[in-house]
Image: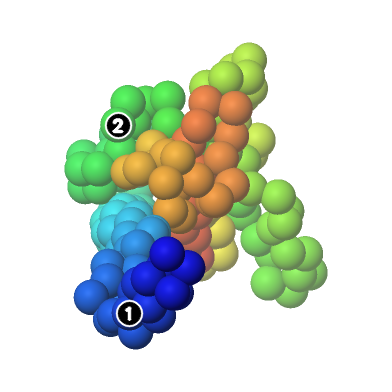
Amino acid sequence: MMRFAHKAMRRFARKEDGNATIEFAVLFMPMFVTMLWAVELGMIHINYAMLERAVDATARDLRLATGTAPQHDDIRDVICERTGFVQDCANNLRIEMILIDPNNWSPPPATVDCADVSQPVEPVREFVNNAQSNELMFMRVCAKFDPFMPHIGMGGSIIKDGAGKYALVSSSAFVQEPR
């Protein structure tokens, strides 16, 4: 009886029938998570490219719009219309516009003013759009997005606010054209 069990065990150890299944079981989850990371990264990149394009086009309009001084809500509406991806744009997009003196340089604040819908509403940090001719303006826009897959892959590891949204920041500097 022992000899029969010993032969059966040796025969079983020599078989190679399940090798592909074992490799699949070991490698499937890391490959699947890597694929989900790539999808999430692609969505982040699309959102960022659309936001960057909208901010650049709006900064160009502001630079060339001599004699007008659109305010925060007007600029926000134009950016939201051009972006197309920001859900509830009126609440998820914040704009800072800072007048910078190039002769007495002081950099804009390092911390970005972003909306967090899980916190009480805060006023815009600084928004000055009354620049005179040839003055340097710095515009920074922060938009909040929902992760495509919030708990899997990159969506589970990116930094999110209390409402579960991540921030994308785009900035642009321009000189106000002469009037």
Query: Mark 2 Cα within 10 Å, few/some/many (few <14, many 20+)?
Result: some
Could you give the CA–CA distance between mark 2 and mark 1, rounded to whole angstroms?
Answer: 62 Å
Image location of residue 64, percent across then percent down: 30, 60
Q: Which of disc 1 and disc 2 is earlier in sequence?
A: 1
Q: In this view, does 80 lie above or below 66?
A: above
Q: In which quarter of the image is residue 78?
A: top left
Q: Residue at x 42, y 46 (%)?
A: 152
Mark 2 or mark 1, which is nearer to you? 1
As drawn, the residue found furthest toward the bottom would be 14
Residue 156: percent from the left, percent from the top? 50, 45
Q: Is mark 2 on a helix, strand or loop?
A: loop
Q: How many labels does the image show?
A: 2
Q: Which residue is drawn at 65% across and 60% down?
A: 100
- Name the side, left or right, on which 57 lies relative to 97: left
Amino acid carrying label 2: it is Gln
Q: Name the residue under label 2.
A: 87
Quarter of the figure with the N terminus: bottom left
User: Residue 145: horizontal and vertical position, in percent?
Assistant: 40, 40
**Front one among 104 and 111:** 111
Q: Is residue 70 above or below residue 174?
A: above
Task: Give the residue number, with chain letter if any, for mark 1.
Answer: 11
- In which quadrant of the rendered view does residue 18 lie? bottom left
Q: Inspect the image, locate mark 1, and give the three-letter code of the amino acid beneath it.
A: Arg
Residue at 62% from the left image edge and 41% from the top image edge: 113
Where residue 177 appears, x then y in whole percent?
A: 40, 65
